[in-house]
Amino acid sequence: MKAMILEGCVDLLKNEPPLWLVDVPTPVPAEREVLVKVAACGVCHTELDEIEGRTPPPRFPVVLGHQVVGTVVAKGPGAERHPVGRRVGIGWIAWACGACAWCRSGNDNLCPQFQATGRDVDGGYAEYLKIHEEYAIAIPDGYSDVQAAPLLCAGAIGYRSLRLTRMKSGAVLGLFGFGASAHLVLRLVRHLFPENPVFVFARSASEQAFAREIGADWAGNFDEWPPSPIDAAIDTTPVWRPVLSALERLSPGGRLVINAIRKESVDRHLLAELDYPRQLWMEKEIQSVANVSRRDIEEFLPIAASAGIVPEVQTYKLEEANKALMELKNRNIRGAKVLVVG
């Protein structure tokens, strides 16, 4: 099969394109695993973290990609959950122990033994992948493969982030950054809390215009002040400046949820400039997000389908993965980026 492989961590701004298109053996599903023929795979900022070493894969070469949609074409011994021919999606978690306190509570994303798709095991930047059957999730009808892919991470982590804000009817939400996840959060809020104001803070005029186009009540840059303070905030950016901006604009008792696996170090020095009385006092809270659990995906997909939430998508061929990644690195974003594989 064809796959785009990463042979080692690199600095994307100083090196040749990081991935290479090669022929590798098609994987063989082991016990309780299914073999999936990949149709589409979303491109996520976490792939940049893996490539640049902020969350490095434990082995090389490795196939990246954890927003995978495809069809079950073969099953290993004991795999009974999905029939051959079923369309499934695979998210960030490839496997978790199922026995620890976190797994038993439905938070398998916190399992100390969890394995990540596209990092610990090969992911969806390839024509096939194998996955434990419990972590292949049926995709609702009504979505194309390309539309479904971003829902498995960008959408589901947005859903988890919104839940962690403890959003209530009438509260004001601030979205800091407006890429794949944030644009789906905005559409989700418009379904769940149609009367709640949503203010979007984004770097570029095009991102601000896109936010207003799909329902933001106000959009500006990180230095601007919205019409009123915000009660909850979600930061989806890879840097630190928006975190300080969000904290300063939060109401007393407000909560900031940081929707990022890792932050880049380019502006880490700003953390030393945090002004406690102005930006964090008055019982403001910061909550991190450790990606998504299987339950998040299983809950979010039917909500998205019933609400008609469809991501804005830019598509690329499998062999154009480097182009998609570099556009993401350079913040050339409108909605989500998806590789069309099969």
Image (cartoon, rainbow, N blue to C red):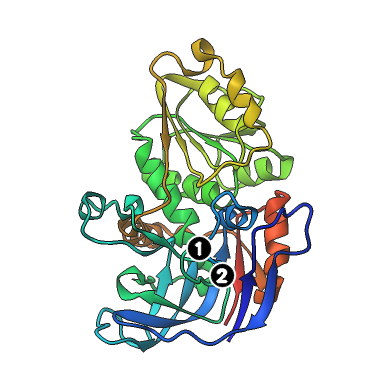
Q: Which mark is residue 119?
A: 1
Instruction: For marks 1 and 2, give the CA distance.
Output: 7 Å
Whether residue 182 is visible here, answered yes or no, is yes
Q: Nearer the viewer, residue 334 or 278?
A: 278
Say left or right for 328 vs 81: right
The percent coordinates of residue 266 (x first, y second) are 68, 37
Q: Dot 1: what SS?
A: loop
Q: Which mark is residue 62?
A: 2
Say left or right for 236 vs 90: right
Dividing the image into 4 quarters, which one contains the N terminus?
Answer: bottom right
The percent coordinates of residue 60 (x first, y second) are 58, 68
When the figure is inspected, residue 53 is found, relative to residue 226, above or below; the finding is: below
The total number of labels drawn is: 2
CB atoms at circles 1 and 2 under 8 Å apart?
yes
* Label 2 CA crowd tier, 10 Å (few <14, some 14–19, many 20+): many
Say left or right for 113 vs 227: left
The percent coordinates of residue 205 (x first, y second) are 73, 40
Q: Name the kind of residue labelled 1 in the image.
A: Arg
Tell me which residue sits at (32%, 53%) in the image: 111
When the figure is inspected, residue 212 is found, relative to residue 300, above or below; the finding is: above
